[in-house]
Amino acid sequence: MAVIHGQKLSHHNGNQHLSTAFSPSNSDGVQFSSTNSRRYLMYDVNDGEGFNLRRDVYMRIANLIVQLNQRQQYDWTLVLPPWKRMYHWRSNYYQQYPLPWKAFFDIDSLNKLIPVMEYQDYINQFGSTIDEIIYLQPFPDPFQGGSFVEKVEQINCPVIHKYKLMDGSFVGYFFGLRGIVAGKLRCMLAQGATSVIIPQLLNSSSGLILLDRAENLLHEAFGQVDYWNARRSLVFAKHLRDEGDRYRLQVFNSTDIQDNIIRHSDWRLLKAKKSRKRGGNYLAVHLRRRDFLQGRKNDIPSLEDAVTQMKIALKKTALDKIFLATDAEESEISILKSQLPIYIYEATPERIKLFGDGGIAIIDQWICCHAKYFIGTKESTFSFRIYEERELMGFKSKMTYNQLCNNHKSNCEGPSKWKVVY
């Protein structure tokens, strides 16, 4: 097994509240039943990918760890990659990266599915050297020969600006952390589900492997039990849930008891039955703007059309308040507020200091999840994560799977309905 060098790293984080999340956690305290050798896997994705796509990639890699440990050759632990700055994290009050997973998610809940540990905890124990990087790229023609075949092919590494060889080690931008180096770099073309990479991992002697561009690997069984187990384990961090609950109570007089919301401290034991009598007395809407105005302008409504659709939804549901989660400009929000009873969780400097932009986005999602009726934005992973959460909470499909339409399109179908499988 490759030698792991002990080296303390430094990181940039001007937010004192969030920086406390880099204190050691108990995420490395997972007990294994066997005496197999411990191995560690970490992953990264394309820098341009957003927060909610990264959550989806986590689910794929979590189930890869499940598959690896089922083989009982090694005991694999997933080292959680620190969160980089996202495109939508626009606040400049504080430097909000790199951030650990416990800033956003409940680590104990993740550990109920697979062994996980924060990267800082790994560094504290073993040092800051990544033994090996496996850099994945897609095949140029995935349907060569007329069919899609799962395969992996090792290739000579092209010029990868992300990593440079210096003094026998690879250096680069590792999650915004200083002092990180890698001992080895291999490049591979890959297509297929996560299991396609298993032979490469098992045949390696490296202690910690970074699987870069992991978004190129697909879900092993999308929408099936393992998919939903990984999704259910992604429980939001308690401080974010608590803040969302505080806002629900203050603004909408919404509580779990009044709204018929069922909770359990262990996600494995929660199987909520569908009920019409669920949710707070407000309508929740996710209205995506900014980048969608350019990249998906044919999928989103004009502000005028959005106002019309929200008014129709209020009348249909007999609700009189709207919680709006949006990245719209302040001028657009003012237009909406002038015509609708809209409430927004304001991203004040104090709240950004406490929760960061990423945490505020999760609070938005949490409040949307508890509404009586939800309307999302077409093709938005932010909305898709809310659909999933409401599915797990036991909302009726017609109260969840709705989306704003571009009224210039003749056919506006609702989003796909992915039912939870236990």
Image (tube, rainbow, N blue to C red):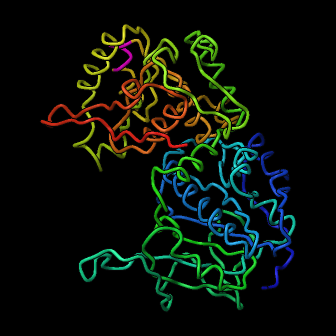
Quadrant containing the N terminus in the rendered view: bottom right
Residue drawn 42% across the image and 21% down it: 373
The answer to which quarter of the image holds residue 210 is: bottom right
Residue drawn 41% across the image and 31% down it: 286
101 left or right of 123? left
Q: Is residue 364 above or below residue 278?
A: below
Q: Please provide percent x and percent y for residue 201.
A: 63, 79
Residue drawn 49% across the image and 25% down it: 274
Q: How many marks?
A: 0
Q: Please provide percent x and percent y for residue 413.
A: 24, 36
Q: Is residue 112 above or below residue 136?
A: above
Along the viewing direction, whichever of 418 and 362 lies nearer the viewer = 418
Quadrant containing the C terminus in the rendered view: top right
The residue segment tinted magenta is 336-340
Residue drawn 64% across the image and 21% down it: 245
The answer to which quarter of the image holds residue 328 is: top left
The answer to which quarter of the image holds residue 15 is: top right
The verdict on residue 298 being magenta is: no
Q: Please provide percent x and percent y for residue 420.
A: 49, 40
